[in-house]
């Protein structure tokens, strides 16, 4: 399990190296690689944002995650990718279009609105979208990261990440999650504790996972 976990994380890092270098040279938001390791589940996630223009008003936003469950639950491993091309219009508010892909439903194109905010201590994304092909679905993504400087080299890090997807017809819950992180950052590295709560389907079948997370930001 540990060797497989390391292999998956290395694959995700290598596959995004070029994108990360482009983001760094343009002084846009960095790319982060994260692993949450526990006894029943391994969770991996990459969050990236790349501006196409110098003023950062248009660009590309991506969240990719993979969940590896314990061997007896291998059929319920899950891959999710959210990709959006955005255009800011006024003070962080704007429009976006893109698609999501998951092992549960395949490729789903969408359009939506967003609000983005970034400062030295706080970053926030609120993104409601509408899926218009294959299934009609309303979704909302929320990500908020906060850092507090404790010393010259150490900062307190926290993140709340949530997602809710609702079928328009029939009117039922499809997929949602709420993730929390709390840890300490040392330069580009962060380590701490995390909790994932996931809900699936109309009956909101749930999974809960607590573990130790490691995050690299480049």
Image (spheres, helix red, strand yellow):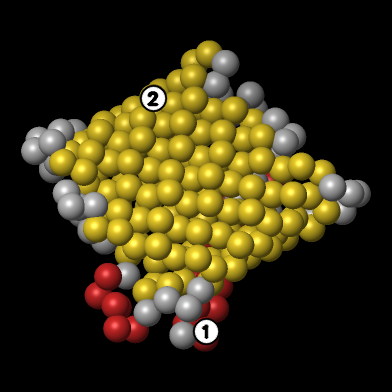
Residue 66, image x, y percentages: 41, 64
Q: Which of 174 and 101 is in front in this view?
A: 174
**Secondary structure of residue under mark 2:** strand
Q: Residue at 79%, 49% (x, y): give it.
A: 155
Camera sees residue 168 = yes
Check disc 1: other Cα within 10 Å, few if <14, some if 14-19, many if 20+: few
Reading the image, the residue beneath label 2 is 113
Q: In this view, does 15 lie to the left or right of 158?
A: left
Q: Nearer the viewer, residue 26 or 150?
A: 150
Which marked residue is nearer to the observer: mark 1 or mark 2?
Answer: 1
Residue 6, image x, y percentages: 54, 78
- Mark sitting on residue 2: 1
Residue 145 vertical placement versus 12 (above, below): above
Q: Which of 22 and 207 is in front in this view?
A: 207
Which comes before the other along the chain, label 1 or label 2? 1
Residue 159, image x, y percentages: 59, 46
Residue 191, image x, y percentages: 68, 63
Camera sees residue 97 = no
How many numbered tags mark residues here? 2
Check disc 2: other Cα within 10 Å, few if <14, some if 14-19, many if 20+: some
Q: Quadrant of the image for the C terminus?
A: bottom right
Q: Residue at 43%, 49% (x, y): give it.
A: 178
Q: Is residue 142 left or right of residue 57?
A: left
- Mark sitting on residue 13: none
Q: Which residue lies furthest to the right in this view?
A: 152
Mark 1 and mark 2: span between their CA atoms? Answer: 40 Å
Q: In this view, does 170 lie to the left or right of 212?
A: left
**Secondary structure of residue under mark 1:** helix
Residue 92 vertical placement versus 77 (above, below): above
Q: Residue at 32%, 70% (x, y): give it.
A: 77
């Amino acid at each position: 399990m540990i060797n497989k976990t390391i292999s998956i994380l290395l694959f995700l890092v290598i596959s995004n190296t070029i994108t990360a270098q482009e983001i760094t040279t343009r002084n846009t938001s960095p790319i982060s690689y994260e692993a949450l390791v526990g006894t029943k589940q391994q969770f991996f996630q990459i969050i990236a944002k790349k501006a196409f223009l110098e003023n950062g008003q248009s660009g590309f936003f991506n969240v990719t995650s993979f969940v590896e469950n314990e061997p007896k639950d291998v059929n319920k491993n899950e891959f999710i990718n959210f990709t959006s091309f955005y255009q800011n219009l006024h003070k962080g508010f704007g429009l976006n279009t893109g698609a999501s892909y998951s092992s549960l439903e395949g490729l789903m194109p969408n359009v939506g609105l967003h609000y983005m905010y970034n400062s030295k201590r706080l970053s926030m994304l609120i993104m409601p979208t509408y899926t218009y092909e294959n299934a009609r679905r309303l979704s909302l993504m929320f990500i908020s990261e906060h850092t507090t400087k404790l010393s010259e080299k150490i900062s307190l890090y926290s993140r709340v990440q949530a997602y809710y997807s609702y079928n328009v017809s029939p009117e039922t819950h499809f997929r949602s999650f709420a993730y929390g992180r709390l840890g300490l950052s040392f330069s580009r590295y962060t380590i701490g504790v995390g909790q994932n709560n996931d809900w699936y389907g109309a009956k909101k079948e749930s999974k809960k996972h607590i573990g130790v997370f490691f995050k690299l930001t480049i």
